[in-house]
Structures are given as structure tokens and as C-alpha cells.
Amino acid sequence: MITIRVYGILVNDNHQILVSDELIRGMYITKFCGGGLEEGEGTRDCLKREFLEEMNLKVEVGEHIYTTDYYQPSAFKAGDQILSIYYKVKPIEAITTPLRSKPFDFDKAQLELYKSRKEIETFRFVSLQDFDENCMTLPIDKIVAKIIRQNYNLLSLIN
């Protein structure tokens, strides 16, 4: 089975890139924000929904950055393949979701929720000066981090 995932690259006015720190079934993962495409949904609509669900944030979806062009097995479902699509995103309102300053800085309520859901997430910004593929956990995200560092004027991601 092929699972389609859609992610957004959000850079703020302070030249920082948004990442999601997640604890999923015992695995600590730093990734770009986004998630799974639902049946009957377009990729851009998926990304808007994911940001709204995860961060209560309305975003404008911009330029396409990358789509997986090789076979990537799922890290969570044996035998499944992942196809990931990445876009620039821009918030169209202020970010009100709590942002953390260090990785995996979950609060007590989140850790309590993890006991039943087995998934929690928190968000933080990483300075573009410090951002590279080593900041990311998942193989496709590492490729996108390299693309951002090598092929894009990082400041152009803001606009």
C-alpha cells in the first residue's frame, strides 16, 4: 500500500524554520509539519487541514519544493511505501500554539495524553543558520533539508 504524506516548510520573519517534535509509539522524531492525505482530498487542502488540526493555524500553501522520487518504505507499517510531497507554507494569522525552545519538551498534559494515544507532538523553530539534515529524523525530511540548504535562497522561503 502507498501512503501519501504532505508537509509544509514554514519559515518565520526571524529566519527560523518550523519543525514538529513527536513521540510516536516510543520513537522520538523531528520532522516537518504535515500529515497523511485523506481520500478525496487534494494535497494543498490536506496541508491546510493538517496545520489547522495540529496547530490551529491557517496557512497559505505556496510553491512545491519536492516529491519523493524513489522507493521509501514506511517506518511504521511493514510492507507499505511512503510518498511525500513538500510545499512552502505561509501563516495567514498569528501562531498561537505553544512553541518550545528545545527538542521534545513535552508538558505534563501531553505526557499524560501519550499514555492513551501513543502519539504526542510539540513545535519549535530552528534557526536557518543551524538547520540542516541532521536536525531531521526521517529519511525524506533529510533530503528536503539538504534541498533547502543547497538549492534555495533561504530568505525567499519567507515570502
Image: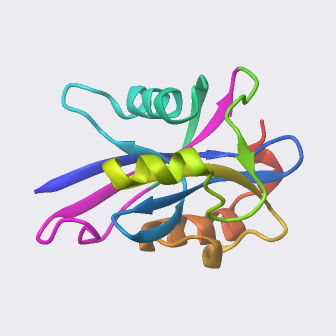
Residue at 50% x, 73% y: name it.
Answer: 137
Residue at 77% x, 35% y: name it.
Answer: 159
Where 12 sits versus 50, above or below? below
Q: Quadrant of residue 60?
A: top right
Which corner quadrant holds the N terminus?
A: bottom left
Where 107 sits versus 29, above or below? above
User: Is residue 86 located in the magenta-colored stretch of the structure?
Assistant: yes
- The residue most toward the bottom is 134
> Left or right of 67: which side holds 48?
right
> Residue 126, percent across and down?
76, 60
Residue at 37% x, 61% y: name it.
Answer: 68
Closer to us: 98 or 149: 98
> Residue 152, percent across and down?
71, 58
**Which residues are the magenta region?**
67-92
Res 3 visible: yes
User: Is residue 138 located in the magenta-colored stretch of the structure?
Assistant: no
Res 65 visible: no
> Left or right of 42: which side holds 1?
left
> Residue 108, percent across and down?
59, 51
Q: Quadrant of residue 8?
A: top right
Q: How is the image coloured?
A: rainbow
> Residue 87, percent across and down?
53, 43
> Left or right of 14: which side holds 123?
left
